[in-house]
Image (cartoon, helix red, strand yellow):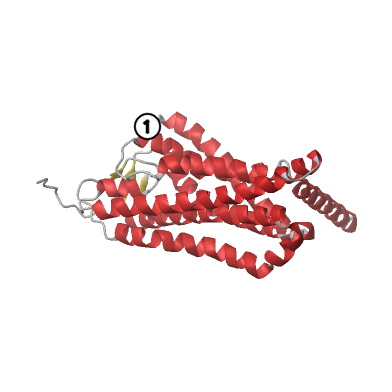
Amino acid sequence: MENWTQIFVTEFIFTGFHITRGSGIMISLLLVLMYVSTVASNLIIIVLVWIDHRLHSPMYFFLCNLSFLGIWFTSTIVPKLLSSFLLDNSISITGCRLQCFFYFFLGTTEYILLPVMSFDRYVAICNPLRYAVIMSSRVCLGLALVAWVGGFVSVFSPYFMILRLSFCRSNTINHFFCDAASLIHLSCTDTTLLDLMVFVTASVVLISSFLLIVVSYVYIISSILAISSAEGRQKAFSTCTSHITVVTIAYGTALFLYAKPAKTDSFNLNKTMALLTSVVTPLLNPFIYTLRNKQVKEAFVDAVRKSRLSQGLEKDWDS
C-alpha cells in the first residue's frame, strides 16, 4: 500500500513547456498574434452573418455557432497560458476546475456540432427542393441546442467526479492548462471509475458523431455521383470540402488526445496536440470555411466598402 502525505491544495503550478524566458517571450508574442487573429476572424464571420441577408441560411447559422465556440474555446486556454509564460504559472483550484470544465464542455459541443453541420449539407445536396422546409429556423435552433446541451450533459458526470478528487501527491501539473488527465494523475483518490468514465464518454461522443458524419457523406457522395454534369458535381462537392477538412483535423487530433485511458503517459506529445487543438485549430477554421466561399467574400467586401463610405461621409460632414 502506498502512503501519501495529505496536503491541502489551494492552487496548482503549471510546468508547461521547458523553455528559456527569452523563448517564452517570443512564443508569447506569437500566441498574442494568433489569439487576436482567432478572435477577430471568428468575430468577423459572426458579424457578417448577422448583418448580411445573403448569409441568413442554416449553413451560416451553424458556422456562427462554430465560430463562437472557437472564440470561447481558445479564450479558455490562451490568456492563462500567456500569463504562465510572462507572469505567474499558478492557478487557483477553483480556476483550474473551471478551466477543465469549459475545455471539455466546449470541445465536446464542437464534436456534436460537426455532425449537425454534415446533416445540413446532406439535406442541401440530397433534398434541395425541400431544404428550406426541412431546415426551418425552429429545426436549426433545435439542432444547435442539441449540440450545446449534449456537450454539457456528456461531461457533467465525469466533471462531477473530478470535483470530488482529493490531492495528496503534489500541486504541480505537468501541462500548460488543467486537463482531466493531469488532475487524475495528481489525485490520491481511487480514480478507476473516473478513468473508465472519461474514456467511455470520449469514445462514445467521438465514435457516434464520426459515424453520423460518415453516414451523411455516404449519401452526399452518392447524390453527387448521380449528377450528370461535371460542373454540377464539382459545385456540389465544393460546398462540402471545407467541412471535410475541419472534420479531418478535429477527429484526427481528438482520437489521439481523448480516445485512450486518461493515465496513458506521453505528456510532451499531449501538450503539443493540446496546443494544436486549442490555439491552431480555432484559428484555421474561419479561413478554411471562407477561402473558397464566394458569398462570405462578397459579404466581407461589401461590409468594408460600406465602412469606408461611412467614414468618408463622416469626414465630409465634419469638414
Q: Nearer the viewer, residue 157 or 186?
A: 157
Q: Left or right: 308 with respect to 19?
A: right
Can residue 171 be seen from the camera position used here? no
Relative to 132, residue 75 above or below: above
Q: Quadrant of residue 175?
A: top left
Q: Nearer the viewer, residue 105 or 80?
A: 105
Q: How many residues crowd mark 1 within 10 Å: few (<14), some (14–19), many (20+)?
A: few
Location of the C terminus by quadrant is bottom right
Q: Nearer the viewer, residue 20 or 129?
A: 129
Q: Left or right: 110 with respect to 41?
A: left
Residue 76 on image: x %, y %: 48, 52
Q: Name the residue type under label 1.
A: His
**Count of marks, rendered view:** 1
Q: Left or right: 65 with respect to 169?
A: right
Q: Give SS at disc 1.
A: loop
At x 34% / y 35%, what residue is drawn? Answer: 266
Q: Left or right: 299 with respect to 7?
A: right
Residue 284 on image: x %, y %: 60, 41
Residue 27 on image: x %, y %: 50, 34
Residue extending farthest bottom: 138
Q: What residue is disc 1 on? A: 18
Can residue 23 be seen from the camera position used here? yes
At x 58% / y 62%, what residue is drawn? Answer: 144
At x 81% / y 41%, what residue is drawn? Answer: 229
Relative to 201, residue 278 above or below: above
At x 61% / y 41%, what residue is drawn? Answer: 245
Residue 208 on image: x %, y %: 47, 53
